[in-house]
Amino acid sequence: MQELELPHGDFLKFAKKVLEKKHGVARVLIEFPKTPSLGMFIEAAAQSCAALNEREEVQEAYLVALKSIKLHNSVTTKRYEVLLREEFTLEKMIYIKFEVTDKDTKIVDGYLTIAIQ
C-alpha cells in the first residue's frame, strides 16, 4: 500500500493509502476523525484522485465540479474505501466516477471534475 502525499494537514487528510492502482482506476482507503458528513466524503474522494496520477512529479489539482452525488446508506463507521474510475479526460480536465463503500455496502457515489494545473 502506497501512502498518498497531500498538502493537507492531518486533521483534513482523509485519503490515507492506495490499496490498488491500475491505469485509470484506483482504490483508496479513507479514514475520518469523526463520523463523516456528505461533504467530508466528497473531500475524501477528491483527495483520493491523487492516486490516479500517472506522472512521477506531484501535480496541483482542484475540484471544479460535482455531479449526481448521492448518499445511499447511513454512515456508521469512520473507515471506508473509495473506488475511482477515470471516465474521460479533456486537456487538463478529468471526469471521474467515484463510489465509497463500507465492506460491500455502497455509501456514496457520484462524479467529480478535477482540473490539473
Image: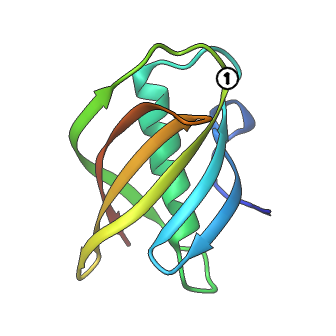
Q: Which of the two residues, 34 or 98, is positioned nearer the viewer here? A: 98
Element carrying mark 1: loop
Compared with 47, 68 (above or below) is above
Residue located 48% across and 67% down the image: 60
Q: Where is residue 102, by image quadrant?
A: top right
Q: Amino acid at mark 1?
A: Lys
Q: Position of residue 7 (x, y in %)?
A: 63, 53
Query: Which residue is situated farthest in the front direction here?
Result: 104
* 55 with respect to 16 (left or right): left
**Quadrant of the image for the N terminus?**
bottom right
Categorize mark 1 by other alpha carbons within 10 Å: few (<14), some (14-19), many (20+).
Answer: some
Q: Please name whichever residue, 23 or 40, is drawn nearer the observer in this view of the structure.
A: 23
Q: Quadrant of residue 115?
A: bottom left
| Residue visible at 45% across and 49% down in the picture | 46
Q: Which residue is mark 1?
A: 78
Q: Quadrant of the C terminus?
A: bottom left
Instruction: Relative to 94, say whether 82 is above or below.
Output: above
